[in-house]
């Protein structure tokens, strides 16, 4: 009896938590960047103000081309022309800039907004819920692989992604058990640093180069019934690659969990 009453009191107390505390838990980066004057924008407000704000996707071009908010402009944080581009967009539109990336734990949007502020722009906000939250809430204003998303059901579920994810030992074991596997390293040139983690059995096709280079390999693998094995830097880029693979009808493909970083860590390297 006492335990049930205590649980009820705890539930009641949690229900009365101030919204700011709940937000701090749901959006872990807000408190960190509040001190530099970066104001977040919620999904509902962005939807209402979409035509009066310039939305900027600060992720890589490949991520943008896979999934982005309708009419968002692609200005990767890593772009050497970042400052000049955002200043030009702000001047041309006369609207506040809203930066976004993948989700609540992705700091790219905040870093991009901070960089814009340091470049002299003041009307800057951050949509830190990210593109996946937007796509779930507003698929009618989301673009997937160049076409309107229309329905959130077209988004790849975590379970579907994890079904193609293999830990290091299982990844290598499946490669060795496969007949004529096609191993593809999609890291950038800078990330790879000339080092093959598969004794030069892999093909280096940076994901940043887009789908054109990958298309030939994927079509060859499907035509010759060869399994595809992909390695990225940290296990995150392959989530975007999966949309392309699924759109091509590929089925026998596998991703290394944690990417190259997991391999280096297992070898005691950083």
Image (cartoon, helix red, strand yellow):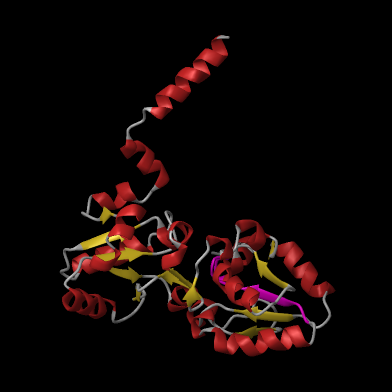
Q: Residue at x 23, y 68 (%)?
A: 116
Q: Quadrant of residue 220?
A: bottom right
> Left or right: where does residue 116 sit relative to residue 193?
left
Q: Position of residue 240 (x, y in %)?
A: 54, 71
Please identify the quadrant where the C terminus is shown. Answer: bottom right
- Whether residue 9 appears in magenta in the rendering, the answer is no
- Whether residue 231 appears in magenta in the rendering, the answer is yes
Q: Quadrant of residue 83?
A: bottom left
- Magenta range is 226-237
> Left or right: where does residue 220 sit relative to residue 32?
right
Please identify the quadrant where the N terminus is shown. Answer: top right
Asked if residue 53 can be seen in this view, the reply is no
Query: Which of the two residues, 269 or 51, is positioned nearer the viewer here?
Result: 51
Q: Residue at x 49, y 81 (%)?
A: 208
Q: Quadrant of residue 256?
A: bottom right
Q: Position of residue 87 (x, y in %)?
A: 20, 76
Asked if residue 152 can be seen in this view, the reply is yes
| Number of numbered discs on residues | 0
Query: Which of the two residues, 259 or 246, is positioned nearer the viewer here?
Result: 246
In this rendering, the answer to whether 108 lies above or below 175 is: above
Q: Position of residue 241 (x, y in %)?
A: 58, 74
In this rendering, the answer to whether 2 lies above or below 210 is: above
Q: Most extreme residue toward the top, as rendered?
A: 1
Q: Position of residue 198 (x, y in %)?
A: 69, 78
Q: Residue at x 46, y 22 (%)?
A: 10
Q: Residue at x 43, y 70 (%)?
A: 68
């Amino acid at each position: 009896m006492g335990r049930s009453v205590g649980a009820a009191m705890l539930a009641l107390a949690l229900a009365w938590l101030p919204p700011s505390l709940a937000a701090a838990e749901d959006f872990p980066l807000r408190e960190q960047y509040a001190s530099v004057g970066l104001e977040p924008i919620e999904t509902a407000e962005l939807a209402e103000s979409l035509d009066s704000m310039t939305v900027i996707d600060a992720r890589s071009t490949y991520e943008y081309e896979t999934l982005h908010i309708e009419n968002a402009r692609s200005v990767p944080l890593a772009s050497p022309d970042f400052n000049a581009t955002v200043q030009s967009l702000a001047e041309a539109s006369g609207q506040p800039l809203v930066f976004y990336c993948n989700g609540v734990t992705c700091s790219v949007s905040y870093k991009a907004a901070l960089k814009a502020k340091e470049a002299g722009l003041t009307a800057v906000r951050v949509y830190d819920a990210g593109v996946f939250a937007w796509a779930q809430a507003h698929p009618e204003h989301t673009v997937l692989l160049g076409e309107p998303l229309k329905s959130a059901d077209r988004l790849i579920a975590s379970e579907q992604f994890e079904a193609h994810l293999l830990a290091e030992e299982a990844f290598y074991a499946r490669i060795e058990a496969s007949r004529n596997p096609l191993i593809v390293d999609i890291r950038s040139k800078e990330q790879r640093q000339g080092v093959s983690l598969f004794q030069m059995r892999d093909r280096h096709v940076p994901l940043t180069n887009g789908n054109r280079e990958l298309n030939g390999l994927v079509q060859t693998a499907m035509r010759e019934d060869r399994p595809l094995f992909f390695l990225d830097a940290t296990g995150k880029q392959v989530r975007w690659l999966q949309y392309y693979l699924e759109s091509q009808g590929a089925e026998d493909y596998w991703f290394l969990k944690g990417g190259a970083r997991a391999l280096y860590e297992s070898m005691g390297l950083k």
